[in-house]
Image (cartoon, rainbow, N blue to C red):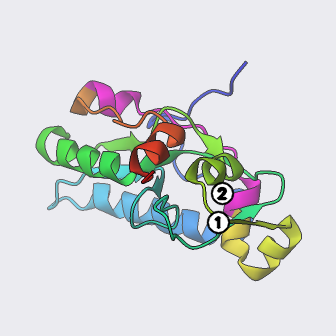
Amino acid sequence: MPAARVTEEDPFGVRGGTVADHVVTGLVEAEGRLFSAGHVAGIALRYGIFYGPGTWFDPTPGSRAMPVPAGGGSVVPWVHVEDAAGATVAALTRGRAGEAYNVVDDRPSHWGELAAARGGRRVLVPGWALRLAVPYLGALMLGTRLRVSHEKATRELGWNPGHRDHRSGMAAVRVP
């Protein structure tokens, strides 16, 4: 049975006792300030990890080699940059002030799956080396299991990802 998906009603930014807690705290505080600023009618968009042209996960030929945790790494939510832009426009035109919306594709996956769909060169990095060299990225790439639902964004904003998962998103961008 697949793990339950996190919604906007679930606690946001749960700390896990790792070096990533500093980033989580910053995200939680930024969203809290947005919603508590009485003179501003804000909307929070909680994006998955961006992939597509111009990102670290750019599938176009000649892109730099991608470091990947040996064994595939964590399961995280993703979103194609074009879908993220579409969700942003939808939130600006139809979003409700004081609300948060998850902006992710339909299928979370581990880093190794995304790297395989991206194509190109990959560098397998042992977990211990990743944690030592870039502690926050190591925590994200190795210690996260996060499945997120975009149901609220679909229902309230009329938004659905055009690329349902990283495989279709990467294939749409890759030049033959």
Total labels drawn: 2
Please give left or right for residue 121 compared with residue 72 in the image. left
Identity of the residue drawn at 54% across and 43% down: 11
Identity of the residue drawn at 30% across and 54% down: 35
Please give left or right for residue 22 compared with residue 174 in the image. right
Q: Position of residue 8 (x, y in %)?
A: 44, 37
Question: Does the rendering let one see residue 117?
Answer: yes
- Extent of the magenta region: 140-155
Q: Position of residue 56 (x, y in %)?
A: 51, 67
Say if the magenta span includes residue 85. no
Q: Is residue 79 above or below residue 34?
A: above
For residue 15, the mark is: 2
Q: Which residue is under mark 1?
A: 21
Mark 2 to mark 1 CA distance (whole Å): 5 Å
Please give left or right for residue 8 compared with residue 19 in the image. left
Q: Position of residue 122 (x, y in %)?
A: 70, 64
Identity of the residue drawn at 27% across and 33% down: 159
Q: Quadrant of residue 53?
A: bottom left
Say if the magenta span includes residue 148. yes
